[in-house]
Image (cartoon, rainbow, N blue to C red):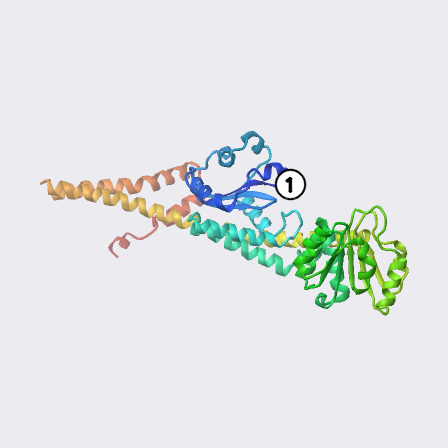
Amino acid sequence: MTVIALGINHNTAPVSLREKVAFTPDALTDAFASLQKVDAVDAAVVLSTCNRTELYLQLGSELPNKNSLVRWLADFHQCDFEALSQHTYIHENTDALNHIMRVASGLDSLILGEPQILGQVKQAVSDAKHHDALTTQFQRVFDHTFQVAKKVRTDTDIGANAVSVAFAAVQLAKQIFGNLAKSRVLLIGAGETIDLVAKHLHEQGANKIDVANRTISKAQEIASMFNGQAMTLNQLPSHLPQADIIISSTASQLPLIGKGMVEHALELRKHKPMLMIDIAVPRDIEGEVAKLDEIYLYTVDDLQNIVAQNLANREQAAAQAQMMIDEQITVVTQWQQAQSNVDVVKSYRDSQTHISTTLLNKALTQIDDGQDPKEVLASFSHKLSNQMMHGPTKALAQAAQLQDNRTLKILTDALNLNADDDSLNN
């Protein structure tokens, strides 16, 4: 069995090309039907995410021209073959297994260690099975892949630390307040970063998320999803006292929250502490606010330092993960070799059975035609012996000519040449 991993990803191709070869769920049926018509393709898995499109293929003994696989991808999506081939990678056998396992384990992701990719690979395998595009052998490869990906996730810190500013802000809030369900959150801004912060907060248990923005309609889009209120920036002074956690990320050129506004809010809160995280550049919160005793103020630089340290931790975890993958690849290749050995034995026995059956049927036909049975049996015995001795005799002669004593010993033992003549009577 030959395993191929072919595709493009965020490292090799721009989004303009990646979106051209993305597979929609509706296109999978046609894709699998088309792939099964490609020469030598015995099984196929199609993985398509925003960051990658990859084909994982099990091929027969005769390998097609690798360019033909790239051409299939180009033709299926009706895009330029030359442009696609410049951005495509192809891995084979051990390298392909390594790539597949790294992808499933989050080691090949845009964000090192991100957990969503494992579920996406599992879904891709499920889709292949649904379309009868998966063999038992190829399923075994992915069983090993999911086994090592789970081990990487549970036995290393690959996903334990925040590696985005948005997630680092949320992890910091959780570290300080513990149960976020008991805290009221105020987000300032309504851009992509704040939207991501809101989702992370909700995943970590926050259920009261207010949003302030210059345009209230955008604030309402986010606040309505998380049981919160929407407000304009002008309403900040009146709402600030109710917030335990404030995370701000706007495009304002001047600070939106000053020391005086925060002091007033603290008085109304009876000096109950507040966490303020400013991830805007320029800053949304005056630096003087950090001097207030009940305020924990963190800037984007503080979070970047956290992210940098966490990335270093993930890199260390990635090295551990690669060792686990290497061990799993050894297990898979040993299993593949064992399967290959079984196939060799079966092929040999089948060929010998075919020879004897063919000669026997010919002999029986000759007897039915009236030929002397003794002569037919003598001819049958002679032809059967010659055919069965041809391969071993050729191997023995070659080993003797090369003075390959080790091979001679193996052949001698296998052919039982040292046995007593009496063994024929047993």
For residue 263, what is the image quadrant?
Answer: bottom right
Residue 278 coordinates in the image, percent (x, y):
80, 54
Q: Residue at x 54, y 55 (%)?
A: 146
Residue 109 coordinates in the image, percent (x, y):
63, 48
Using the image as rendered, state which of residue 326 and residue 348 is in the foreground. Answer: 326
Q: Residue at x 86, y 70 (%)?
A: 270
Res. 116 visible in picture: yes
Q: Residue at x 60, y 45 (%)?
A: 50
For residue 362, what is the image quadrant?
Answer: top left
Q: In the drawing, does residue 184 fall left or right of residue 30? A: right
Please give the residue where the numbered disc 1 appears in the rendered image.
Answer: 11
Instruction: Tell me the SS state at disc 1.
Output: loop
Residue 404 coordinates in the image, percent (x, y):
45, 41
Residue 258 coordinates in the image, percent (x, y):
88, 55
Q: Pick out the residue farthest to the bottom.
A: 270
Relative to 34, does residue 82 appear above or below in the rendering?
A: above
